[in-house]
Amino acid sequence: MIASMPAKAGLLTAAVLAATALPASASPAPGHPEVQRVLVQAVATKSAPGIVTEIRDGRSTWFGSAGASDTKTGRKRQQHERFRIGSASKAFTATVVLKLAAEGRLSLDDTLDRWLPGLFDGSAYDPGQITIRQLLNQTSGIYAYTNDEDFFARGVGAAWLKHRYDTHTPEQLVKVALAHPPTGAPGERFTYSNTNYILAAMIVEKATGRTFAQELTRTVLRPLGLTGTSLPGTDPTIRGPHPVHYSTLFSSDPQPKIYDATEMNQSFAWAAGGVISTTTDLNRFFAALFGGRVLPAAQLREMLTTVSTDGAGWIPKTRYGLGIFEQELPCGVRVWGNAGATYGSWNYAMGSRDGRHRVVTQVNGDWAPLSVFTDVLTAEFCPAGSR
């Protein structure tokens, strides 16, 4: 599951107001009519209240949209909007860790007992056998706190409305996870767990003496000029222009009610899924990252060293690196990046291995099928005869 929301939740369909438009702020370039058709179709089939895609190909940028940012007013989707990126946050977190490794502040081979002594006492885990690398490539065997039944229950329906402004500390989240047995031996297999990235960010704070948000700003956001990207912590608002984030709150009703989930305290996801960004910032970040302009060559090689996700119930035809993954499209082309979902938002940020050709798609709802994002990537990267 790519989401920073509870992993047991499904993606459901619902009726929303459908409208299509290409905003005045867009810079349309020829060559992407198939992508635009996918966007229009997603809204027409009610898979999304609104959807945007920004494509960066070398020096050329194209932006397309369909549907609404606000279904009550009919306000259209815009290129500058900020949205919650869910587990795409993991690419930022892994980058911060790798930057510290390049600076000699820590090593990927460091075990957790070095940085977090005492945290695992009384649990079924041996922190002396789990490395930072295993946190980042999701092979640590540490249970996902989002799968805890009580934690999950607080994120569904009326319970979510009651708890949407709750604050969770990293220690509290880890404690929930450590109450459960390991999902496997360290390094044994890929098992997706937000707990891994909470622990990674805690190590960043131990290694630097600063907050994770401060290190994220120092190592990534400020150098790349990502002015629309932030980690708000306990602030429930999205500062700046943004779409309404529409959510079913995981209702099992075949025609669920749609809620405005824009405001929420995402400390429950923190470094695993709490970042806010824009299509432009995500394209800039991943273009720089894969283009070798963020990490030294040695650390980028570590990031791109992947493990199989087969049998994990995750995205088909993928391999996971350190905070990023590669995915094989139906035509055989491989794309690289990350993706994420949270209440009211789902985004996919993928592209070529060299960083030159990037595609970011975002839906301001949480019930769209995965095929919407695959269809956008297929339309952009696959020759017409191979789709």
Image (cartoon, rainbow, N blue to C red):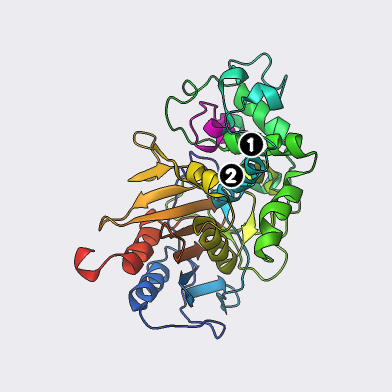
Q: Is residue 258 at all visible to an observer of this figure?
A: no
Considering every residue shown, the one lying at the far left of the view is 385
In the structure shown, which secondary structural element does the residue marked by tag 2 occupy? helix
In depth, the one of 354 and 129 nearer the eye is: 354
Could you tell me the amino acid type at mark 1?
Ala
Outermost right residue:
209
Q: Position of residue 240 (x, y in %)?
A: 71, 69
- Magenta region: 133-149
Image coordinates of residue 226 in percent, x first then y, are: 66, 64
Residue at 67%, 13% in the rendered image:
122
Q: Is residue 161 visible?
A: yes
Up-down: is 66 above or below 291? below
Q: Quadrant of residue 29?
A: bottom left
The residue tagged 2 is 94
Residue in the picture at 59% in, 61% down:
245
* Mark 2 neighbour class, 10 Å CA radius: few under 14, some 14 to 19, many 20 or more: many
Q: Is residue 356 above or below residue 194?
A: below
Q: Position of residue 312 (x, y in %)?
A: 39, 34
Looking at the rendering, which quadrant does residue 46 occupy?
bottom left
Q: Which residue is mark 1?
A: 200
Q: Is residue 377 magenta?
A: no
